[in-house]
Amino acid sequence: MGAADAELWTIGAFARASRLSPKALRLYDELGLLPPVRVDPVTGYRFYAAGQLERARLVAWLRRLGMPLARIREVCARDAAGAAEQVRAYWAEVEADTAQRRDLAHFLVGQLAREDSVMGTTAPLEMRYAALSDAGRVRESNQDTAYAGARLLAVADGFGAAGAPAGAAAVEVLRRLEPGSGSAGGVVSAGGVLNALEDAVEEARRAIREAAGQRGEEEAGSAGAAGTTLTAMLWTGSQLALVHIGDSRAYLLRDGGLFQITTDHTVVRALVEEGRLTEEEAASHPQRALLARALTTDEQAPAVAAEVRVQDALPGDRYLLCSDGLSAVVPTREIREVLTGVADPDTAVRELVDRANALGGPDNVSCVVADVHLSGVDATVPEADAG
Ligand code: MG
């Protein structure tokens, strides 16, 4: 260590003084947020100057505020007045977000409270549904699959050389769960359905590998990584069992509010949740479509879990399942407008696909719309401007 290094702090000493962990300091270095003044070229040890302590303390406090790292980088780049403005703007967003979450919490409390009183006492529920899949305006082929039946709603977005057969195979496996289809049909208890769905996902995984294998023999060596997303809901008569893997989405329209009830399994979404990216950065990230989870043909890929859970259905509920060719192209506000304004499911899916294509149709686009209504009751809601 040279004479100049005598003034420098080791990462351990600097961590203690700044109340940041050495692990956090290494991460902030990688992100360019708080680079050490010197890195030993031989040992790789990091050294910090006493003058960096103020910046480190500010970072630590902003982290305690819950501010994402990308945002902290912006604050640190400003002078004091600019930094104050940035923190003020961030906090306004946090409060707006909290208000939205409060609404969602109220919705969930209401839903759970109703569960006891409603389930088992009402007349059986039924669904009216429609599905539509379109290649879009840019892609040569359609690798999406959309399906809606009396018991099953499903969207799969295939990718890679065998993407289309992979998506189709995954949906085909789920169709065997529909009552009346033979095998596992007629499962009505929620727990039973969830187990059946988990098994079906495993079977789908095998089926898409088979589908890719056949294609691989035809086009030796050109198959590459392929796979599919899968978002599907299986109807039990009073509940919907949801299975979800990838970045296709399920939404619920209830009491006029549109709620996304699935999480995107993308790398970018995970980075946002870790605070490494802001929402704005995620929206324009070049690799925003990169999937963190999918059903793939890659035998070496870890067997990642699908999300499975039960969703209570109420008369008047409207569900939308869609591929990212809709959700990444048509603004949520417009999707909600179509879902609240167009009563007929067939017309609604047509309108949603048309909107994606009107905005350039950059990807295959698939939609399933399903309305829950009391058995024997005409579900048609008169449209405000229907003549
Ligand atoms: Mg897509």
Image (cartoon, grey):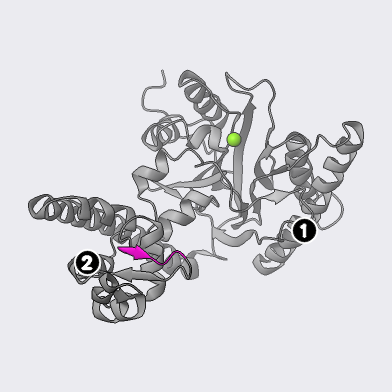
Residue on which disc 1 sits: 202
Q: Amino acid at mark 2?
A: Gln
What secondary structure is the magenta-colored segment mainly? loop
Residue 80 location in percent, x, y?
Answer: 9, 55
* Cα–Cα span, label 1 and label 2: 52 Å
Quadrant position of the N terminus in the picture: bottom left
The span picked out in magenta is: 37-41
Disc marking residue 52: 2
Q: Are marks 1 and 2 in contact (CB under 8 Å)?
A: no
- With respect to residue 4, does 173 lie above or below? above
| Quadrant housing the C terminus | top left
Taking depth in this image into account, of 152 and 249 the one nearest to the observer is 249
Residue 301 appears in view? yes
Residue 256 visible, this angle: no
Residue 7, image quadrant: bottom left
Q: Please indicate whether residue 293 sits to the left or right of residue 330 in the image.
A: right
